[in-house]
């Protein structure tokens, strides 16, 4: 392997590392631009320092991204429920809760912390939990429902995706050019010219493109932390120049939107699939706050004119089965009443109506 090939391989590895993000395990990334977006989730089986890896789109056309997040912290009468892992929610008694933001991490008690999307998000969550500690459970529930309604609003997310698309359009187009010049044009020229003066001129063109990208980024990134140093890295390193738009996308709002707020961006089919998944996880997962979260979702679906029956998955009835579990969809005979695999979820008849949630429950 020649020196030029080794250098290209190093650039490729560094570029893939730039495309990697460590996010809260339940995070949903919106990838796309304009009116065309799709979801990508973090790889939950791998967790490190409270985060899971997610790979951004690394091949042209390069896309913008916006992070959305389900509710991680929900107040219960017995304590604060931490829902960082969708399979194992944790309940932390109010006596132990001592919220403290440290960078992107929110420490709730010794040995308990969650990863937030940004430092601003961590401080916002700290203020919210601190406020809940001094309130009654009725006031906490009311505050959470108000917070949930705000995260489910479609208008802020629509405005954010439109703004991100406009701010990063020129950066992404120039990133395409830098990507093609680095991994296509220079590779072909190196095989043709080898270590010649002409190859040095072709490399100089790449640095001119990077310098242009740095100037464009510096003008777009008003108010971004460490703007000068990021622009300097873009001017000197190709992998940073290709991912310049990501810095603007990572600059999140204090209160990230819920994934269900992206109905207009992802389309009806993808949204309904996600809504069914989140509703079943929330309603039928054993949790101290399942009723509170279900109430927030039911109010949202009612406002969206989506009946709960459209979100309930009913399996094809097998011979001899009279009941099914709405959580895991396992089927049972009429003598059964609860699903032990789903921690005692009440079974439902095949012709039963969808379950609703009332404030009293």
Image (cartoon, rainbow, N blue to C red):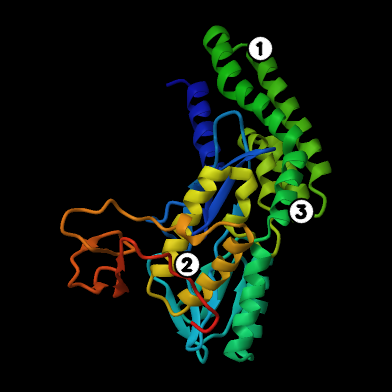
Residue tagged 3 = 224
Q: CA distance from mark 2 to mark 1?
A: 55 Å
Q: Residue furthest top?
A: 192
Residue 303, placed above or below residue 94: above
Residue tagged 1 = 197
Residue 25, placed above or below residue 142: above
Q: Secondary structure at mark 1?
A: helix
Q: Secondary structure at mark 3?
A: loop
Q: Position of residue 205 (x, y in %)?
A: 72, 20
- Identified at 67% across, 35% down, the residue is 241
Q: Nearer the viewer, residue 217 or 310?
A: 310
Which tag, 2 or 3, sits closer to the chain's start? 2
Q: Secondary structure at mark 2?
A: loop
Give the label, 2 or 1, closer to the camera. 2
- In the rendered image, which quarter contains the N terminus? top left
Which tag, 1 or 3, sits closer to the chain's start? 1
* Label 2 with label 3: CB-CB less than 8 Å: no
Which labelled disc corresponds to residue 84? 2
In the figure, is residue 216 to the left or right of 42?
right
The crowd level at tag 2 (other Cα within 10 Å; few <14, some 14-19, many 20+) is many
The crowd level at tag 1 (other Cα within 10 Å; few <14, some 14-19, many 20+) is few
């Amino acid at each position: 392997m020649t020196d030029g090939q080794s250098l290209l391989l190093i650039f490729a590895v560094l570029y893939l590392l730039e495309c990697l993000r460590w996010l809260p395990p339940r995070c949903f990334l919106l990838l796309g631009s304009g009116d065309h977006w799709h979801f990508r989730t973090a790889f939950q089986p791998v967790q490190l320092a409270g985060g899971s890896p997610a790979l951004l789109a690394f091949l042209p056309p390069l896309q913008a991204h916006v992070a959305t997040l389900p509710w991680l912290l929900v107040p219960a009468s017995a304590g604060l429920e931490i829902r960082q892992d969708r399979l194992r929610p944790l309940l932390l008694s109010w006596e132990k809760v001592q919220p403290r933001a440290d960078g992107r991490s929110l420490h709730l008690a010794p040995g308990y912390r969650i990863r937030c999307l940004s430092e601003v998000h961590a401080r916002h969550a700290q203020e919210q939990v601190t406020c809940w500690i001094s309130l009654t459970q009725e006031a906490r529930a009311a505050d959470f429902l108000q917070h949930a309604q705000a995260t489910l609003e479609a208008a802020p997310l629509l405005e954010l995706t439109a703004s991100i698309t406009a701010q990063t359009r020129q950066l992404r187009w120039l990133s395409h050019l830098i990507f093609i010049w680095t991994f296509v044009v220079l590779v072909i020229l190196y095989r043709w010219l080898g270590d010649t003066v002409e190859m040095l001129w072709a490399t100089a063109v790449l640095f001119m493109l990077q310098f242009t990208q740095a100037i464009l980024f510096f003008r777009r990134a008003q108010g971004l932390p460490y703007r000068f140093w990021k622009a300097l890295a873009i001017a000197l390193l190709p992998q940073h120049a290709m991912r310049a738009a990501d810095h603007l996308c990572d600059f999140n709002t204090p209160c990230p939107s819920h994934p269900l707020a992206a109905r207009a961006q992802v389309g009806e089919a993808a949204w309904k699939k996600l809504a069914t998944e989140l509703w079943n996880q929330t309603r039928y997962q054993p949790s101290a706050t399942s009723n509170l979260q279900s109430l927030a979702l039911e109010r949202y679906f009612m406002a969206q004119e989506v009946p709960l029956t459209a979100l309930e998955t009913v399996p094809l009835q097998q011979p001899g089965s009279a009941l099914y579990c709405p959580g895991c969809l396992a089927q049972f005979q009429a003598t059964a009443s609860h699903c032990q695999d789903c921690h005692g979820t009440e079974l439902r008849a095949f012709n039963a109506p969808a379950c609703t949630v009332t404030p009293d429950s």
